[in-house]
Image: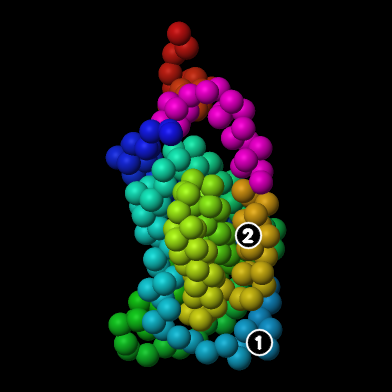
Amino acid sequence: MPRPPDRRFYLLLFLFSYAVWLAIYRSVGAFAVTLDAHDLSTSFDLALPVWPQWVWIYDFCFLLPAFLVMLLGDGHAINRLVIAIFVAVVSASVVFLLFPVAHPLPMLGDSLAERWITYHYENDFPPGANKLPSLHVINAILFWLAVRQGSTSLLARGTMLILAILIAVSTLLIKQHLIIDVLLGIPWAFGVWWVTSRLYEPLEALGLGPEDTVRHVRTVVARRFGLAKAR
């Protein structure tokens, strides 16, 4: 049996990765919002109600990486997940810039959940950017795929699948995304996971432990950009 991954190591890795991911996401969105956007709302999108309480499920997606670090017993699955998240944001950014999407947002009330959704609206590149495909949907499915690979627990796999579905639905019920954003995000996630698997195979073939694989990549990148001296 492989030894459990170093939880502290991976929590720090996710914190660093999230900071870099956020910088990419915000930079792309800040530019995409200046472009001419397309409204792809359908009659079904307009007919969907706003269910404010679903914002808590939507936001739970941001906390899931920390839970996965504690849950997954395969450090290589965590490594693959980190790479997949970056492949997803970089590839989706191409669409964000080439085909910006925005849609009208509802006026909400004064309940805690509604005020929190309004905060999202006001800080998410109004009137809209970084929508198609939905990164929330992509990441939720990637989390499930990582659990499917890195956990032997049927309960964990089933729970993560249900969470992925609920997170996808939440994006519609708080009007952060359109149906087309969700529908494109689903195959996008599977494509990203396949690409990431191909990218990670040569690293796993090195025979290093998962943490040492991360350190190896860090050293290679540092040398490539002249941040470390080759021995």
x, y (%) of residue 151? Answer: 47, 49
Q: Is residue 25 visible?
A: no
Q: At label 2, which amino acid type do we have?
A: Phe
Describe residue 94's horizontal placement relative to residue 127 as left or right: right
When the figure is inspected, residue 213 is found, relative to residue 103, above or below; the finding is above
Residue 173 horizontal/vertical position (percent): 51, 81
- The magenta region covers 194-214
Q: Position of residue 41 (x, y in %)?
A: 66, 81
- Confirm whether residue 83 shows in the render: yes
Q: Main secondary structure of the magenta part?
A: helix
The residue nearer to you, when weighing 141 against 188, is 141
Residue at x 68% of width, y 60% of height: 187
Residue type for callout 1: Phe
- In which image quadrant can residue 109 be found? bottom left
The residue to which callout 1 is attached is 44
Disc assigned to residue 96: 2
Quadrant of the rendering where the N terminus is positioned: top left
Asked whether, in this view, residue 181 is left or right of residue 108, the answer is: right
Circle 2 crowding by C-alpha within 10 Å: few under 14, some 14–19, many from 20: many
